[in-house]
Image: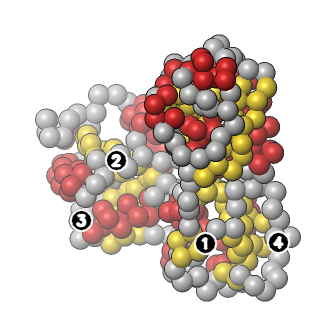
Amino acid sequence: MKCAVISFTRNGGKLNQILCRKLSEAGYPSRGCSIPKYAQPPELPSLQEPLKDWTGRMFREADALIFIGACGIAVRSIAPFVQDKKTDPAVLVIDEQGKFVISLLSGHLGGANALAEEAARILDAEPVITTATDRQGKFAVDVFAKENGLAILEMDLAKEVSARIVDGRKVGIFSEFPMDGELPGELEPQEPVPVGICISLSDTVQPFPKTLHLVPRIVTAGIGCRKGVPKEQIRTRLEQALGQAGVSEKALCRIASIDLKAGEPGILELCRECGIPFETFTAEELKAVPGTFTTSAFVKDTTGVDNVCERSAVLAGGRLIEKKHAGAGVTIALAAGEWRAKF
């Protein structure tokens, strides 16, 4: 979690340097700066651009912004850039005396609450957390999702789940995966309830009248294709394979193929669009994958291995859950890794 820290006074500058050093030591790489009047280069460089421009840039480049100064400065600075709790960075405000650390934005998904606790520990300060589930010590579905690598498919329904929990009402839980640890008391795995959480690779399973889908990001798409196949053609085949397997696109964590395709424009563009990495293997690595696969003499003559999509999916992702789909110059297979929910 990369942190960008800014201060506006002499005392704030001293605090800035201490915080950056200790946060970095604690595993939060941090870089600080100050308004020119109180800069102390090289340890505390001077702000070289308008505060609004710095804030906008840090919204794109950093995982967390920490303002050492007044809340008003922070609020006015971030206001033009706040968009969505799923993508906004964490924002903290610390008073220049270092007595209070306020989690201002993206407390759960952005990690502001946890960062505020850590910063408060470092500074021997009081963390100010206003999120209702945190204040009441109750189950928070967005925190659970983040800690378990789950995609939340219906954010509005996630708010309703949290509201029910804060109000003391039960929320259902259904999982197609093993669950480790003690189930929170707010969750009901057996009795029928109107609102519940479903942990599944599918976004169509509906165990409750109102179902919040949490999808583990554990599926790898193994892809083979002719040279120059456009991204749209690959995406169409991928969507067909996912639909056939009953798997949400949000379950995808990577695309895999043979190293001959490392520079394939259509696959690279699709990975950028989906925000997932592209992993490739040599023919020798793919040939060594154990299992029974759909073979092709043409593919073997061309690449040196009898199957690219299934073998690369299994090698990168685990168990084959959807065998080879072929058409329009594209082959796709799906594999899923082992996963367990942890409470």
Q: Hey, what amino acid is under mark 4? A: Phe
User: Is 176 left or right of 317, judged from the image as shown?
Assistant: right
- Does residue 164 appear anywhere in the picture? no
The mark closer to the camera, 1 or 4, is 1
**Residue under label 4:** 208
The colour style of the image is: secondary structure
Q: What is the x, y in percent for residue 312? A: 56, 37
Q: What is the x, y in percent for residue 176? A: 69, 67
Q: Earlier in the sequence, mark 2 or mark 3?
A: 2
**Residue under label 2:** 3
**Residue under label 3:** 122
Dividing the picture into quarters, in which one does residue 206 lie? bottom right
Dividing the picture into quarters, in which one does residue 211 lie? bottom right
Local packing at callout 4 (Cα closer than 10 Å; few below 14, some 14-19, many 20+) is some
Q: Residue 78 or 322: which is nearer the viewer? A: 322
Q: Which mark is residue 178?
A: 1
Q: Residue 168 or 221: which is nearer the viewer? A: 221
